[in-house]
Amino acid sequence: MDTATPAGGRDYTVWWFLAGAALVTLFFYRDFVFHPERLLFGSDMLFEGISLRRFYVDEILAGRGVPLWVPHVYGGMPFVAILPGPIFYPSTILYFLLPLHRAIGWTFVLHTFLNGAFGYFLGRSFRLRPASAAVCGASFLLAGYVTSHLFGGQDGRMFTMTLIPLALGLLNRGLERNEFRWFAGLAFVIAAQTFSAHVQMMYFSCLALAAFCLYHVAFRVPPPASGEPRGRAYGRPLAWFALANVAAVLIAAPQFFPTLTVLEHVTRAAGERGYEFAASWALPPQELTAFFLPDLIGSLPGSYWGQNPIKLHTEYLGAVPLALAILGISAGFGRALDRDQRRVVWFLAGAGLLGVLFALGAATPVHRIAYTLLPMMSSLRAPSMMLGPVTVFVALLAAYGWEAALNRRAAVGATADDGTGTNSAGRRLSWPVLVLGGPILLLGAAAALNPQGLANFVLLSWYPEGWSRQPSAVSIEALRLNGLFLLAGFGLAWGAARGVARHSFGAWTLAVVLAFGIMDLWRVDARYLRVQDADASLATDPVIAALHENTEPGERVWAPSLAGPTPNYRPNQLAYYGVPSASGLQKFLLRPYARLVGGITPDEGLLRHPVVRRLLNVRYLITPGAQEGVEAVAEASGRHLYELPSELPYAYFPASIETVGDTAAAVARTLEVSDPARLTIVEDRAGIEAPSAGRGSASLVRREPDRIELEVVADRGGLLAVSEIHHERWKAILDGEEAVVWRVNTAFRGVEVPPGRHELVFQYRSPPFSIGVWVSLLTVVGLTVSILVSWRRRSRGSEA
C-alpha cells in the first residue's frame, strides 16, 4: 500500500476498499437492510417528501407519464416546477422496482457506499497512492455532516454532497490532462446534482468547483510551450469548465426550465427576503466545536442547547480524518509533498477556511460579501450548507496527510546518510501541528477529564447571561466519550503516520487507523439513523378509509394545524393517500391562491373566510379533537373527520357577474361575497369582452392531474366557474376549439360557454418541460458522442 502500483502486478487496494465500504454500509444500515418490513425514518420525509413521490410513481405506473400538475396540495399546483424531490435523479429508478418506502431507504444506503467510492476516486484523481485514496474514501464514507441528514430524510441534500468528490475528481482530471471528456463527465454529475432538486447545495458545490478551477489556472497551469498562445493555455480550461456547466443546465432542462418559468407565478413567505433571511440558519461560532466535539453543544431534540431553534444534524468530521488533515496542512509547509501537491493543499486549506467563515453567516464579513457579489445568494438561506464542500476538502486533506507519511517513508533511506531524514523534517513541521492541533487537544482533554466543567465554562463564557437552554446529563456523558475518542484518534493517527514514515510500522497500520476512524464516525452517526415499522407508519387509518369511500372527484379536504390533544395530519400527509387537500407545505405557492388565503400558510385564511372554503369545494374537515354538537364521520388516533354542507357545486353558472380591473380589487370583492353562486368576480382582460351570466349545469366526467373533462348543458350562454386553481398553463378546449380561460374569484378558472350541450376539457400543457426533454436528450447524445470520440482518439494515440 506504499506505492501506486506494486512492481509484481496490479494493485488491489481499490477492490479491498470497495468491499470494506460495502460491508460497513450494509452493517451500518443492518436494521433496515435485513428487515423488509421496516423503513428509514426521516422527519421531513414522513410525510412531506414521500407524499409527492408516491403521487409521481402512481402516475407513471398508471401510464399517464410524468405528471405536470399535482391536485393534492394547495388545491392544485404545478408539479415538476416546484421541485418535488429527486424525481429525475438516476437512483429514482428504484422507486419503480421496490415498494416506495423501501426504495427511498435503499437510495440512502447506496449513497452512503458511494460516499466512500467517490472519495476514493477523488484521491486517485489527484494522483495519490491507493492507500491515501483509501483515507479520503474512509473519511467521507460516514462523514457526519453528510450522513446525519438521515434523521431529516433530506435525501436531495445528501445526494448532492455525495457527488461533490466525484465532480471535483473529474474536474481535476480534466484540468490536468487537458481533455474535454472529463469535463463532459463533469456536466453529467452537475446535472445529476440539479436533478436531486436541492438547488442550494448544487449551487454551493459549483462555487467550490469554480474556485478550484480558477485556482488551478492561476497557480497550477504550466507555462505554455514555445509557440503556443498564452491565452489558449489559460483560457481553454475556463472555457471547458463553463461549457460543462452550460451542458449540465441543458441536461437538467426538464427540471430547470419549468422551475425557472414558474418563478414569476409563485410567492414565498413574506419574511423570506433580505439579508436577515439569507443569513438565517448559519453555523453559530460556538458550534465550530462540533467539528471535533459533537456533543459539546449537542444536536437533536433533548440535547441541543445552541442558538438555532432546532438542530437535526452534526458537523462532526471525525478524530482520525481531522488529525490526518492537520498533518496534510502541515505537509504543505514542508518538503514531504511535491510542489504541485503543496499547492493543492494550500487551496484545500484556504478554501476550507473560507467555506467555514461563509458558513458562520453574519458573524464574519465573508457571507455578506458573497451575498452582495454573487447571484442567487439573496434567495438562499442556511449558509451553513457550505460545510458540504468543506467536508470534502477535509477528507482530501486527510489523504494528503497520509500521502506525506508515505513520501517520507519512501525517502527515509535516501536521506538517512546526509542528516536530512524524518527527524529533522518532523521538527520543522511541528509548529503547524501544534498551532492547529493544540487547541483541539486541549478541549478534548478537558472533555475527557471534566466534561461538566467544560460545559459550564462554555455556557458562562460563550453565551449571554441567563441563557435559557442548558446541557443535559446525557450530553455531559456523551461529551466525556467525545474527548476520549478525540484523544485516542489523534494519538493513533499521528503515531501511525510517524511510525509508517520511519518504517517502524507496516502497511497494516493504516487498516487499524481507518477502522478506528470509521468506528468513531459510526458511533456519532448512528443516533441519526432510525427505523420504523412501515405498516405502523404508512397504514391507512379509519379517517383515510372514510375519505376514500365518501369523497367525490373535485372535492377537497382540510386538516388545519389546530391545537388539540393530538396533532393533526401533517400538511402533505393526506397527499400520500391520494386525498386532495386545500392546504399543504411547499416552498412556493401560486400567487393568486396566496393572495386569496393571505400568505403561504393557508390555514388562517381558510379559518377567517368561509367563502374561500366554499370556493375550494372543501367538503370534509379534520380536527385534532372532537367538536361539540357535531357527529364525526370517522375518528382515528384523536383525529375527527366531519362532513361540511355542500353549498357550492364543483362547476356552476353564477347568477350574476361583476368585473373588476385589477387583482387587489378582485381579492377584496371575492372575500366580501357571501354566496359565489349568486355573484362571481371576474378579472378584466385587455381587449376581450367579459362574459355575461348564464344558466345551466355541468357534471364532471373525468378528472386526472393534467386533464379534466366536463359535460356542460347551458340553457343560456355565459360564464361557467370551476373549482380549480387558475394557472396560465391550463388550456380550455370547448368542443375541440381552444377557449379563453378567465380568472374568477381571484384564484379559480372560468370559461364562457354558449347555449347548448358541450364537452369542455381542461388540459395542462408545459412547453418548458416538453422543450426541456428534447434539449436534454440532444445534449446527452452530444456529450456521449464527444466522450466516445475522445476515447477512440486516445486509444489510437496509445496504439501508435
Image (spheres, rainbow, N blue to C red):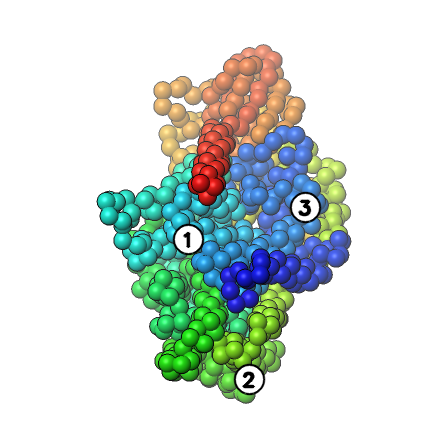
The mark that comes first in sequence, 2 or 1, is 1
Q: Which residue is mark 2?
A: 448
Could you say where residue 232 lies in the image, as x and y percent from the top left?
A: 28, 44
Residue 250 lies, with reference to residue 289, above or below; the image says above
Which residue is pictured at 71% across the width and 41% down the height? 547
Q: Quadrant of residue 793?
A: top left
Could you say where residue 780 lies in the image, as x and y percent from the top left?
A: 49, 35
Q: Secondary structure at mark 2?
A: helix
The mark that comes first in sequence, 3 or 2, is 3
Q: Which mark is residue 172?
A: 1
Q: CA distance from mark 2 to mark 1?
A: 41 Å
Crowdedness near tag 1: few (<14), some (14–19) or many (≥20) residues, C-alpha within 10 Å: many
Q: Quadrant of residue 411?
A: bottom left
Q: Amino acid at mark 3?
A: Leu
The mark that comes first in sequence, 1 or 3, is 3
Crowdedness near tag 2: few (<14), some (14–19) or many (≥20) residues, C-alpha within 10 Å: many
Q: Secondary structure at mark 1?
A: helix
Residue 777 lies, with reference to residue 85, above or below; the image says above
Question: Mark 1 or mark 3: which is in front?
Answer: 1
Given residues 137 and 604, the one toward you in this image is 137
Crowdedness near tag 3: few (<14), some (14–19) or many (≥20) residues, C-alpha within 10 Å: some
Report if residue 645 is visible in the image: no
